[in-house]
Image (cartoon, rainbow, N blue to C red):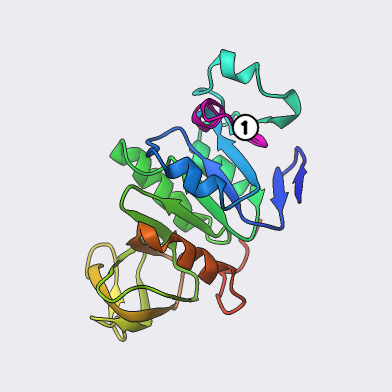
Amino acid sequence: MINLKKNQSIVRSEEPIAVVGGGEIGPDDLNLALIRVNTVVAADGGAIPLMDSGRMPDAVIGDFDSLSRGYRDRIPAERLFPIREQDSTDFDKTLRSVEAPLVLGVGFLGGRLDHQLAVLSALIRLQDRPCILLGEHEVVFHAPPRIAFDLSPGDVVSLFPFQRVTGRSRGLEWPIDDLVLEPSGRVGTSNRALADVELEVDRPGLLVMVPRNALDQIMQAFLSEQTGRWPARAE
């Protein structure tokens, strides 16, 4: 079910949704997301590849500086939700304006590095908005307090801290138990799965990257009742 309303939460869904941006989108990216969701939201110019694929977005959120008039005029007015402030990215505007058990983000990785870093920063900051970003080779997500997921032995598991975190792991070739991970110190790139993986972290701030073909396993992990979730932000 989708509930569109022009207030703080623009889109509310009881099922996973997709959010599409205007960045690099691989030939199968949209299909991978759209076959897994019923609701799709465009972050500003993300409406263009969606409409070119034949799918009308259920909502478009952003400052609309990347959405040409020709496309905008084709979208029903009740699906347009402009947020005019310029202090945040369209990904930030969109993610903070949706409520769903899980968001699949397409069109936010690749391209300009500054845009990618801004997206990853928002992923950390909006910690109560579970989101999986689909990249060319991997999927990226912000680690909840606890998560367990299935991987094949040898799959790469990279951990990158945006803040100082500690944690515990099971199923990694190099466990993170008793380690301090931080941006200016030890990071955890190019670890490998030995079997099914479990991660626990003491605070928000850790990005996890696993192979793209593990998308369904990560979705299942986020939707599992056993997966923890960071508390909602104070308004």
Q: Position of residue 197 (x, y in %)?
A: 38, 79
Quarter that holds the C terminus: bottom right
115 in relation to 220, above or below: above
Q: Amino acid at mark 1?
A: Ile
Quarter occupied by residue 107: top left
Q: Which residues are magenta?
A: 46-59
Q: Is residue 52 magenta?
A: yes
Location of residue 82 with respect to 39 vertically, above or below? above
Q: Find the residue positioned furthest to the top.
A: 70
Check if residue 90 falls in the magenta segment: no
Residue 190 visible (yes or no): yes
Left or right, 46 with reference to 118: right
Residue at x-position 59% and y-position 68%: 223
Q: Position of residue 196 (x, y in %)?
A: 38, 80
Residue identified by numbered label 1:
83
Q: Residue at x 65, y 45 (%)?
A: 39
Left or right: 12 in relation to 198: right
